[in-house]
Image (cartoon, rainbow, N blue to C red):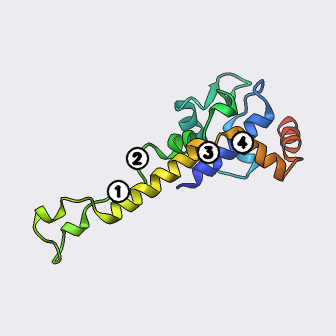
Amino acid sequence: MSEGVEWALHSCLNLAWIGSERAVTAARLAAYHELPAAYLNKQLQALSRAGIVGSVSGPKGGFRLARPLDRITLMDVVAAIEGPDEAFRCTEIRQQGPGAGPAEGYAAECAIAGAMGRAELAWRRELASRTLESLREEAERQAPAAPDRIRRWFENN
């Protein structure tokens, strides 16, 4: 999974703490964590295409959340950034090279592909069961001062 997922998740939480009445530019969101603005902007555009954030034009433009945190799952963010493809793709290498047998010997699913598919399904289900609201609550338990600190930084910078 790319670092863009981490950046996107933090940006969503920061936008939530800043408030829906304010749009924030990609450059300002990037500056808060000292990230490359152009790359973060690509992540924000992907979130916008997925309907997770909205883009606001004009001098006070930027990004803000497009829907409440309890309606955005971690899987929504991962899929927006990484795309819908499965993480593991079996290319049937067991059918190649000197150890390959006749094609009829490969009727059953590859054991490795099956195991990886089940693991990915469990991973996707877990991500789909967690909302950004539950992540926000956990983050605030761990760092209760973070929301105010973030709001103040964005108000003053």
Is there a contact, CB below 8 Å, between mark 1 and mark 2?
yes
Query: Mark 2 belongs to which amino acid?
Result: Asp
- Point out the tag, 3 or 4, that comes first from the N-terminus: 3
- Point out the tag, 1 or 4, that comes first from the N-terminus: 1
51 lies above or below 115:
above
**Where is residue 92 drawn, in percent x and y?**
25, 62
Q: Looking at this view, is 58 or 24 the one in front?
A: 24
Question: Quadrant of the image for the C terminus?
Answer: top right
- Point out the tag, 2 or 4, that comes first from the N-terminus: 2
Is there a contact, CB below 8 Å, between mark 2 and mark 4?
no
- Point out the tag, 3 or 2, that comes first from the N-terminus: 3
Residue tagged by mark 1? 89
32 lies above or below 97:
above
132 lies above or below 122:
above
Q: Of tags 3 and 2, which is closer to the observer?
A: 2
What is the distance, in whole Å, between disc 1 and disc 2 at their CAs? 9 Å
Q: What label sits on residue 85 in the rendered view? A: 2
Residue tagged by mark 3? 40
User: Is disc 2 placed on a helix, strand or loop?
Assistant: loop
Query: Mark 3 belongs to which amino acid?
Result: Leu
- Residue beneath the point at 63% across and 51% down: 6
Residue tagged by mark 4? 134
**Where is residue 105 drawn, in percent x and y?**
15, 65
Query: Mark 1 belongs to which amino acid?
Result: Arg
